[in-house]
Amino acid sequence: MKQVLACVFIITCLASCKKELEGGRTSFADNFEDTAFTRKEWRKVSTVDGNEQFSDTFAQAGNHGFYFYAVPSGDEVSKSSRHHQDLNFNEGDLVRFSAWYYVDADDLANLFICDLEESAYISSSPGMRLMIDYRGQLLLERNKMEMRTVQQIPGAERTFPKRQWVRIEFECKLTRKKKGYVKVWQDGALIIDVQNTRTLAKDFIYATQGTVGIMNSIEVGITANWRTAHTRLWIDEVEIRKIN
C-alpha cells in the first residue's frame, strides 16, 4: 500500500511540474540596465560566505553589467550566480543563448559560467553546462544527464581570453532522442558542433529521476568553481529564446 501511495505521489508531482513548466517563457533577456527588473527576475545563488553579486557600472554595452565574485573554494564548490526558472523549452524546440562575459582570474580551470537545466523534483537539475577546463578551453559539460562532456572541434580549439569581453553563443535542438545538436560560438567562431545527440534529460531511476523533458532553468555567473583563487566575472546582454 505504501508503494502504491508513493507512486501516486510521484506521478502527481511530475504532472504538477509539467503543468507549471508549460506556463513559462520561450524568450527572456536582460541587459541589466533596469535594476528593479534584474532583482525581480533573477534569484541569488551563493554557497560560500564572502561571495557577492551586484549590479556594476562596468559593462560591455550601456551603463551596467552584472558582477559576480567568488572567494577561493578549496575542496567545496564556490558559487556566485543568478538563477531564472520561468522558461519553457520542449521537445523539438530550437533554442539559442547568448551573452557577453568578462573574467578576471589568473586561472580559469573548472570555472562554470552558464547552466541550462530542468528543475526536476527528484534529481539534481540535469542539463548542459558551459565550463572552462584546465587548458582554458570552453566545453559543454553534461554529467548530470549521464552523458559525456563535449569538446571543441579538433584543430579549431580556442582558449577563453582573460580580462576582455568575450561573446558566447550557444544553440541546441532539444530532444530526448539522439536527433538533436549543439553548437557553441566564441566571438563568432564555431568551436563546438555535435550532431545526432540527446539534448534533454531522459528519466533514469537514481540518476535523472523525475524529469519530464522540459528545459526551464538558466543559471549564469560563477555557477561552479573548485579553484583556490579569487574569481571575478562580469556578464552583460544575456538572452535566451526559441528560434523555430
Image (tube, rainbow, N blue to C red):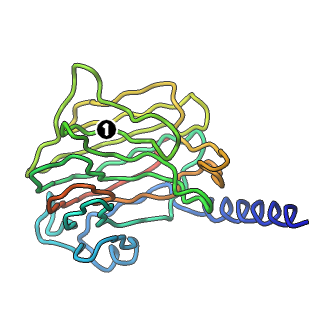
Element type at marker 1? strand
- Residue 119 lies, in percent from the top left, at 54, 60
Query: Residue at (44%, 45%) from the top-left corner?
Result: 128
Direction top: furthest residue: 155
Taking the spot 25% from the left edge, 44% from the top edge, the residue there is: 132
Q: How many marks?
A: 1
Do we see residue 67 in this rendering? no
Mark 1 neighbour class, 10 Å CA radius: few under 14, some 14 to 19, many 20 or more: some
Residue at the image position 55 percent from the left and 62 percent from the top: 24
Name the image quarter holding residue 210.
bottom right
Drawn side of residue 87 relative to residue 225, left or right: right
From the viewer's side, name the closer residue of 11 and 241.
11
Question: Relative to residue 181, is residue 215 depicted above or below?
Answer: below
Tell which of 160 and 209 is nearer to you.
Answer: 209
Q: Amino acid at mark 1?
A: Leu
Q: Is residue 49 positioned above or below 185 on the image? A: below
Q: Quadrant of residue 149?
A: top left
Percent across and percent down for residue 159 are: 16, 36
Q: Quadrant of the N terminus?
A: bottom right
Query: Quick check: 121 left or right of 38?
Result: right
Q: Residue at x 67, y 59 (%)?
A: 18
Above or below: residue 94 compared with residue 31: above
Mark 1 lies on residue:
139
40 left or right, relative to 111? right
Looking at the image, which residue sits at the far bottom? 36
Q: Nearer the viewer, residue 152 or 23?
A: 152
Is residue 149 shown to the viewer in this render? yes
Q: Nearer the viewer, residue 221 or 184?
A: 221
Q: Residue furthest right?
A: 1
